[in-house]
Amino acid sequence: MLKRIDEFRSFFEEKNIELIIPNIVQTLSEEELEEILPTVDGWIIGDDPASERVFTAGKKGKLKAAVKWGVGIDNVDFAACKKLGIPIINTPNMFGAEVATVATSYVLGLARQTYFIDREVRKGNWVKPAGRSLSGLVVGLIGFGDIGKATARFLKGFDMKINIYDPFVNKEESDLQNYNFLSFPEKIEEADFVITTCALTPSTRNMVNADIINNMKDGVYIINVSRGGIVNEADLLVALQSGKVEAAALDVFETEPFPIDSGLREFDKCIFGTHNGSNTIEGVRRASHQAISYLFEFLGV
């Protein structure tokens, strides 16, 4: 939203609301938020640490309401908002297809090594690594929410077998017969690709760890387009070094921006993103309009 903020300025101007746009790369610190929030009436939250500490600081000042832009809420203390009487909501079901297209591109990129080939050609090399045909390969898909459903639908088009892990699946959905629903980590050893599309919660943190990876088949591919922290990066590094994991594609990381000294950078066949899976012109526009609408409702303007 910040990259396209000029598109939305008129909505605030019509309501005579001043926009405060911080200078930010990925997130603001708690200290920075403690300075800003008491001076504003409403807050549209990105990936910032929206903790009780910062909400308390805001409540002591002018802060009246907040909206979490996007679906992920692992960085937001909703309980603190309830305690402090600050109305808050997120904007779910905005980016399922957008993030799923990135997950799908990672499957294709890892299977056919297109990113690796590109890097080598730029170096002056002419490499022709053998790829994998997708038809008949097995996907272990962790999470069957908006993103997971779209990812499963796209990958089904490549005639892949989809094993889904999600204890909260709606059993009444009409397309369930197209997939296999299992209890994690049942049959994880079958998966050629393991893809995480679930929310980061206490139960999913470090869900893909050394014990789980060791039960996967040799040469598995791991993809994370949901939240850093679901895949244990230290355990993934060990698995890449041993060859247990052939390659990984990560759009999200435990620490963002991705640390320059991470050992994961040593593996040329891996693919790395910038937590950018939702970022399309259409998706940003859709979520931003929804966030603005919610915030204006809370503020009564």
Image (cartoon, grey):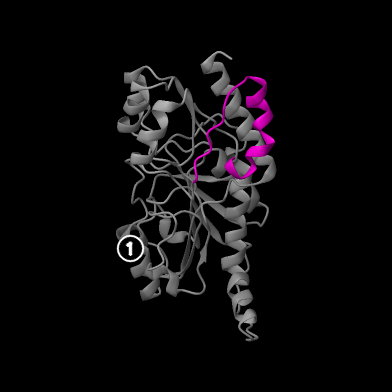
* Residue 186 shows in this picture: yes
In the rendering, at what x and y percent does residue 29 appear? 37, 43
Residue 205: x %, y % from top left = 34, 47
Which residue is depicted at the point 60% across and 80% down?
120
**Above or below for 241 versus 233:** below
- Dot 1 alpha-carbon crowd within 10 angstroms: few under 14, some 14 to 19, many 20 or more: some
Magenta residues, as a range?
Answer: 1-23
Task: Decide: is 235 above or below 165.
Answer: below
**Quadrant in the picture for residue 254:** bottom left
Residue 251: % across, % down: 51, 55
Secondary structure beneath dot 1 equals helix
Q: Residue furthest bottom?
A: 125
Q: Amino acid at mark 1?
A: Asp
Quarter of the image where the C terminus is located: top right
Q: Foreground residue, 83 or 150?
A: 83
Residue 21 is a magenta residue: yes
Q: Quadrant of the N terminus?
A: top right
Residue hosting label 1: 235
Q: Nearer the viewer, residue 184 or 187?
A: 184
**Which residue lies at the image location 57% right of the left edge and 20% below the top edge?**
296
Instruction: State the residue at coordinates (56%, 31%).
Output: 19
Measured from the top left, where is residue 107 in percent x and y? Answer: 58, 61
Count of numbered labels shown in the rendering: 1
Q: Quadrant of residue 259?
A: bottom left
Nearest to the observer: residue 165 or residue 197: 197
Quadrant in which residue 283 is drawn: top right
